[in-house]
Image (cartoon, rainbow, N blue to C red):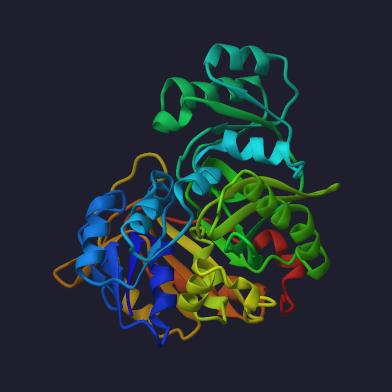
Amino acid sequence: MKVMVVGDGGREHALIWKLFRSDRVDKIYAAPGNDGMTNIAELVPIEADDIEALARFAEKNDIGMTVVGPEEPLVAGIVDYFIERGLPIFGPKKQAALLEGSKIFAKSILNKYDIPTAEYEIFTDPDTALNYLESAEYPLVIKAEGLAQGKGVIVASNYGDSQDAVARIMEDKAFGDAGDRIVVEDFLEGEEVAVLALTDGETILPLTTARDHKAVFEGDEGPNTGGMGAYSPSPYIDAKMMDRICREILRPTLKALKSEGIDYRGVLYVGIILTENGPAVIDYNARFGDPESQVMLPRMKEDLLDLIEYTNNVQLRAFDEIGFYDFSAVCVILASAGYPLTFTTDYEIKGLEKLKSHDDLIIFHSGTKIKDGKYYTNNGRVLGLTVVGNSLFNIINKVYEYLEEVEFEDMHYRTDIGFSISQIADTNLE
């Protein structure tokens, strides 16, 4: 089968890497992809938001399955457009993807169906928001309502922080139209975890867990990014807690969507915080995470194409569970200094050939290009270095050893990915 993966980042490279291992996949196209994918996929010069051109390419080239990586085309309705033309595609339709595309819609679902989440208020103009925030209790979380590539969430410790957040989101339009409205939430204390699941609209099955590190600097300081690193699985989710998450969050979410007349088929990513009162939803995503995919997909036992087809065909009931290997994985993102704000690209990347000697290391390209046979930086996030092994503590140390072998000018990375769990990470994490 010919498969097309839509997108150009590390998540898409991880999807291609996993699909390449399927005996059923004959050829993979990446649209638009990046040069780091060219050893296993053919690049197609079509942007992820050019839905019509993607559909024409899929039809002309007899693509057996299109897999959508980023959220923007999902929210724009790429799945609806393909299905109307009889083109196989994986991901939720536009109405279902609104669960990620609108935080207000997501909050309304959570509130209406009593799924645990933080208390919140919605504001459509900055003055009303600031009047509320002046007398509010802190800390609070201020979110741009729409898509902001994971960067539109600001934790405010005081009123001054809130003023800055409102100005940035609603007045300066740092996230464009996504900041026309904001959601102000109570800050919930606890461990964060991402729980990903597959649902075919009738059955929902958890995949595995991961922990992303959003902030650009150590200690979760600085602005949010698309993700500076991740590990999988989370040691804070045992079988008992996963059962509770299924009972209180995953299955109720699917039931809520069905009650609203929404047929959700695809990946459901639930950001969860483990509070003293139990798990609560931070947010939903309608696709694989980035960089979470770079630590989850290497651990997946199943053929990804098989899972995709079972999901599309409403056949997930055939699975008791979706298998994952017992080993752990950790990913550290190498970024351009200044990301996620302003940064410079086009620096030569040195040391990639040396990294290939490590059998436990997988390199996922997020933003690279090739010139004259050499790799150069081409985006804010440049590379994801993923190490797999039985001891999370050991592989965290390894990934930091390995990244010393690669360099480019203005290279930036967090030095504390996974370190918060080092006290419990010296055993094999199931």
Q: Is residue 260 left or right of residue 229?
A: right
Q: Nearer the viewer, residue 108 or 175?
A: 108
Can residue 280 be seen?
yes
In the depicted structure, whether residue 127 falls above or below residue 221: above
- Whole-percent x and y of residue 161? 60, 25
- Whole-percent x and y of residue 18? 44, 76
Q: Residue at x 19, y 67 (%)?
A: 60
Q: Residue at x 72, y 37 (%)?
A: 112
In the depicted structure, whether residue 158 falls above or below residue 103: above
Residue 40 picture quarter: bottom left
Residue at the far left: name it: 372
- Quarter containing the N terminus: bottom left
Q: Residue at x 83, y 66 (%)?
A: 240
In the depicted structure, whether residue 209 falls above or below residue 262: below
Q: Is residue 114 left or right of residue 263?
A: right
Q: Residue at x 60, y 17 (%)?
A: 129
Q: Nearer the viewer, residue 2 or 121?
A: 2
- Quarter containing the C terminus: bottom right
- Whole-percent x and y of residue 93? 46, 51
